[in-house]
Image: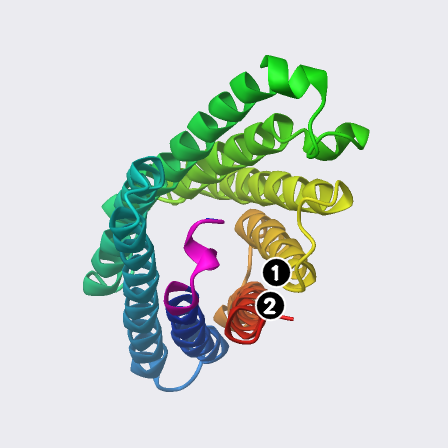
Amino acid sequence: MERIIKSLTPTALIVAGAVVFVLGTGFLVASDATLASSNPGASGDLAQAGRWLQFVAWACLLAAVCLAGWEAILRSDWVAGAEIAAAALGTLLLMIAMASLAASNGSSAAAAVTGAVGIGVWALLVLSRAARVSLNEQGPAHAAGSPLTSEGTRGRQADLWLAAAIGLFALAIGYGLTSAGSAGTGIAAGLLEAAGIAALAWAVATARSRRMLNSRPVPFVLAGLALLAISFLAAAIVAGLAFGTLTALGVGLTVVTAVELAAVVAVGLAAWTRVRELYSPA
């Protein structure tokens, strides 16, 4: 991801995707809020519009990843190009999953599996980075002490990449479990997804404490990850509760989706802050 947000145009596309995703999630909030209304078709129409908007958002993210990869190829940076190609594959699978979900009115079990595979591709990519960084940190240059490691733990990155990979694997497993549809798997899915996001948040927060990340978007990223973890925990709670009425169920789902909306807004603000940094560097 750090290679993707080094350029202005891909980061701007991420901002555009975040804006569209916020709009789509807003439609889903409205859908959950009107679940028990006198017009049952209204809730389904709002949800369908929201899913298609989220599909467009994933398309914007895929375009950002592909553009970053093309820029790496133009620079003849083949290692970065290969990594971004893997990231593009994972993002493409997530976009296909959202398209399948939207086309099936949210009833496609295969969409969750496809999305889980896409997240798994990202996890494998991060795991490979953790392995490469670990080998570099065991090399003679790192052992002798370099400008990046002169302040003790400042240069250690392998453990952070490994934690991020573990978090993504947990997120992938939890996302895949959502296809089962039972209460027990719903609880497990929410807990795994929350744990995965928490691992990612820990990696980002630790990297910031080691002064590897000093940019202004980091607090927004941490806020977004924290809110996303809360939304997954709330989803696990909703999955485990037996709601007697559609109104109560709608309230529970509205809370979950509203927290998710706040998380996406925070991530969008982080991307926008990064665009401002790239457009007018201090």
What predominant SS class does the magenta segment belong to?
helix
Residue at point 35%, 61% (across, down): 61
Residue 164: percent from the left, percent from the top? 56, 36
Camera-side residue of 54 and 43: 54
Which of the labelled discs sits on residue 3, or is there none?
none
Camera-side residue of 248 and 230: 230
Residues at marks 1 and 2, CA–CA distance in whole angstroms: 5 Å
Residue at point 70%, 33% (across, down): 147
Q: Is residue 176 visible?
A: yes
Which of the labelled discs sits on residue 266, or is there none?
2
Question: What amino acid type should be assigned to the residue bearing mark 1?
Answer: Gly
Position of the C terminus, as image quadrant, is bottom right
Residue 113: percent from the left, percent from the top? 30, 40
* Residue 134 inside the magenta-drawn segment: no
Horizontal side, residue 250 vs residue 111: left or right: right
Q: Is residue 176 above or below residue 143?
A: below
Q: Is residue 138 visible?
A: no
Corner quadrant of residue 195: top right
Q: Residues within 10 Å of mark 1 (few under 14, many from 20)?
A: many
Region rendered in magenta: 2-10
Corner quadrant of residue 83: top left
Question: Label 1 belongs to which residue?
Answer: 224
Q: Residues within 10 Å of mark 2 (few under 14, many from 20)?
A: many
